[in-house]
């Protein structure tokens, strides 16, 4: 009897893993269709089927904004400045480094900062527990405190990869995770004494009133050539860029694109347009934190492991730095790497001689440090760099928060 039960359990586990692999392959395929990275017959048929649904999605987005704009639904004001970092598209613009840049700048200049995130793909409370809490009218659970500015309390699985990475890189800054970011903001103000809230990926989160909207646009992905979800990557129509207080053109090459700026000015004539890029800083060995200069990668044969929205952009970074990519495997965005995933990657990567395995910083927090890769695992540290010939982003933030204690911008 016990042997039969063990067989059934083992069979169910194998079936679950099989379905998870199929689901992940489907996510990657859908991402390729949305980003127009595939042109085979299957991708074209799916794109044609999804195209009519984009009109329905656009109508629903317009209705929701109409309700908030005309006060049928009222956003909550928490009594402190709220900076919203977001975009019009699904992933791939580099919101997390910008959020880190803003939070570090505010903290350095004397503000008590709390970052509010929804914690995408973080471990949630079990469904039955949530249902029982609702049925018995219990007090809602407090938000997850990833970091109070002094200690990091949660794992990447519990917090989500991006909140955990922000908590690791930003000592002195609180990071909270909750789907209800109004509740998270109230907790940050009351318990953690925050006086500035930074809403990560919050442009579409309307229940909390934002005072400064920093909207990111990928310069390599012109918005006028994109479709709305579910056919494309747009969360909102391009005209909604008018809600932005500041427009950041990310992944810029530094060369001015006046045509693109004119298209943006047609929808928003008041927001400053600032160009920036995601600049590689150094490589970090995942096992022990040892740093290597960028020149270290020149001529090295590497296998690339990634689970991000734009893996082609990351691989392009490595190629430009001088790496020879012998094998790469792409998973869906925010993929939770299992031992089976890493084992299969390891087996395929070692078919070609490699000197290192390279991944992104966001992916590295979801990979066990003790996993025995064929070659040492490194991740690339990337930070935001504002181009010196564009308007000063820090001055824009200072104009929004004149109480900043900055030696660069003394009070009048």
Image (cartoon, rainbow, N blue to C red):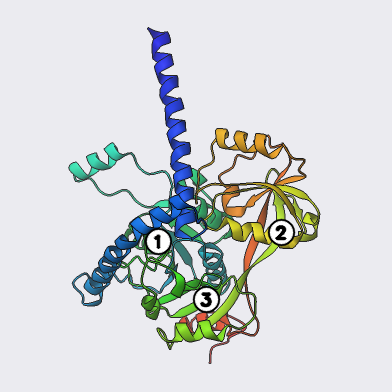
How far apart are the alpha carbons under marks 2 and 3?
25 Å
Instruction: Tell whether label 3 touches label 2 (CB within 8 Å).
Output: no
Dots 2, 1 in contact, CB < 8 A? no
Farthest residue, direction bottom: 412
Identify whether 252 is placed above or below 144: below
Asked whether residue 370 is in view, the answer is: no
Taking the spot 56% from the left edge, 64% from the top edge, the residue there is: 97
Image spot of residue 379 (x, y percent): 66, 52
* Residue farthest along the top direction in this orientation: 1
Pick the front one: 144 or 280: 280
Left or right for 104, reference 84 = right
Give the image location of residue 231, x and y in percent.
38, 60
Counting residues from the start of the chain, the first of labels 1 and 3 encountered is: 1
From the image, state whether disc 1 or disc 3 is nearer to you.
Answer: 3
Query: Residue at coordinates 37% horizontally, 7% vertically from top-left?
Result: 1
Residue matched to label 1:
188
From the top left corner, tell me how far across and down residue 127 is, in percent. 30, 40
Q: CA distance from mark 2 to mark 1?
A: 42 Å
Q: Check disc 3 and report its element: helix, strand or loop.
A: strand
Picture quadrant where residue 123 is located: top left
Select label 2 or label 3 by which is in front.
2
Q: Where is mark 2, residue-wise? A: 319
N-terminal-most mark, 2 or 1: 1
Give the residue at the far front of this rendering. Answer: 41
Q: Marks 1/3: CA distance?
A: 27 Å
| In the rendered image, the vertical position of residue 376 relative to residue 185, given as above or below | above
- Camera sees residue 251: yes
| Neighbourhood count class around disc 2 (C-alpha, 10 Å): few under 14, some 14–19, many 20 upward | some
Number of residues whose C-alpha sits closer than 10 Å to that of mark 3, classed few (under 14), some (14–19) or many (20 or more): many
Question: Tag 1's secondary structure?
Answer: helix
Q: Report the disc number at residue 248.
A: 3
């Amino acid at each position: 009897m016990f042997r039969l039960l063990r067989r059934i359990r083992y069979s169910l586990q194998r079936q679950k893993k099989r379905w998870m692999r199929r689901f992940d392959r489907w996510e990657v395929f859908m991402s390729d269709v949305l980003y127009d990275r595939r042109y085979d017959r299957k991708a074209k048929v799916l794109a044609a089927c999804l195209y009519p649904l984009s009109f329905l999605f656009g109508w629903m987005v317009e209705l929701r904004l109409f309700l908030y704009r005309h006060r049928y639904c009222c956003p909550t004001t928490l009594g402190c400045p709220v900076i919203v970092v977001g975009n019009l598209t699904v992933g791939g613009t580099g919101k997390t480094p910008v959020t880190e840049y803003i939070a570090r700048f505010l903290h350095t200049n004397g503000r008590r900062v709390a970052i509010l995130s929804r914690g995408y793909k973080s471990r949630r409370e079990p469904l039955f527990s949530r249902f029982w809490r609702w049925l018995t009218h219990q007090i809602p659970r407090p938000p997850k405190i990833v970091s109070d500015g002094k200690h990091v309390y949660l794992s990447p699985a519990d917090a989500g990869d991006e909140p955990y990475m922000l908590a690791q890189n930003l000592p002195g800054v609180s990071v909270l995770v909750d789907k209800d970011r109004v509740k998270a903001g109230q907790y940050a103000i009351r318990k953690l004494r925050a006086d500035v809230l930074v809403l990560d990926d919050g442009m579409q989160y309307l229940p909390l009133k934002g005072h400064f909207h920093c909207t990111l646009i990928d310069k390599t992905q012109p918005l006028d050539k994109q479709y709305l979800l579910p056919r494309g990557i747009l969360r909102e129509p391009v005209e909604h860029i008018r809600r932005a207080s500041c427009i950041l053109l990310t992944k810029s090459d530094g060369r001015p694109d006046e045509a693109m700026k004119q298209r943006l000015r047609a929808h928003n004539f008041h927001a400053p347009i600032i160009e920036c890029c995601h600049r590689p800083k150094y490589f970090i060995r995942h096992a022990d934190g040892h740093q290597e200069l960028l020149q270290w990668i020149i001529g090295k044969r590497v296998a690339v492991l990634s689970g991000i929205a734009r893996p082609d952009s990351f691989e392009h970074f490595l190629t430009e730095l001088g790496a020879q990519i012998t094998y790469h495997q792409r998973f869906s965005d925010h993929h939770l790497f299992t031992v089976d995933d890493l084992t299969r990657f390891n087996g395929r990567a070692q078919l070609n001689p490699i000197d290192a395995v390279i991944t992104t910083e966001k992916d590295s927090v979801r990979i066990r440090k003790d996993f025995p890769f064929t070659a040492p695992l490194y991740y690339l540290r990337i930070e935001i760099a504002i181009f010196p010939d564009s308007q000063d982003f820090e001055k824009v933030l200072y104009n929004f928060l004149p109480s900043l204690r900055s030696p660069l911008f003394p009070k009048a």
